[in-house]
Amino acid sequence: MCLHNPTDWAKWFALAEWWYDTTCYSATQLTAYEVVYNQPPPLHLPYLAAESSHRAVDSREESS
């Protein structure tokens, strides 16, 4: 994700964190999310701009 544009790594950080928190560990057979919240992680659905019914969500400006 960052090979061609190494300065863009910060844009992918949230997705990398989600992957890490929802990856099953062999020692526990659980994800970090399950350990903390005691339930399976929800399905990750990418956010699509202007798709929220809450104005506060869509009013957040992207940092560049």
Image (cartoon, rainbow, N blue to C red):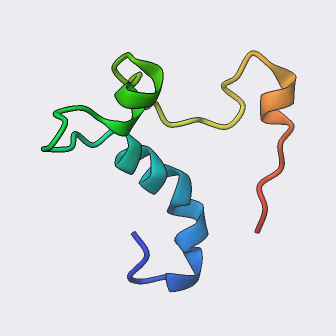
Q: Which one is in front, 21 or 36?
A: 36
Residue 50: percent from left, percent from top = 72, 31
> Residue 11 sits in which quadrant?
bottom right
Q: What's the residue at 70%, 22% (across, down)?
A: 52
Q: What's the residue at 49%, 82% (across, down)?
A: 5
Quarter holding the C terminus is bottom right
Q: What's the residue at 16%, 33% (across, down)?
A: 29
Residue 60 in the figure: left or right of residue 49: right
> Residue 21 sits in which quadrant?
top left
Q: Please tell me whether residue 11 is drawn above or below residue 39 in the rendered image.
A: below
Q: Please tell me whether residue 18 is drawn above or below residue 4 in the rendered image.
A: above
Q: Which one is in front, 28 or 45?
A: 28
Q: How many marks?
A: 0
Q: Which one is in front, 30 or 50?
A: 30
> Residue 40 sits in which quadrant?
top left
Residue 47: percent from left, percent from top = 58, 35
Among all residues in the image, which is located at the extreme front? 27
Q: Which one is in front, 4 or 15?
A: 15
Residue 39 in the figure: left or right of residue 57: left
Residue 26: percent from left, percent from top = 13, 44
Quarter holding the N terminus is bottom left
Q: Please tell me whether residue 3 is drawn above or below residue 13 in the rendered image.
A: below
Residue 46: percent from left, percent from top = 50, 36
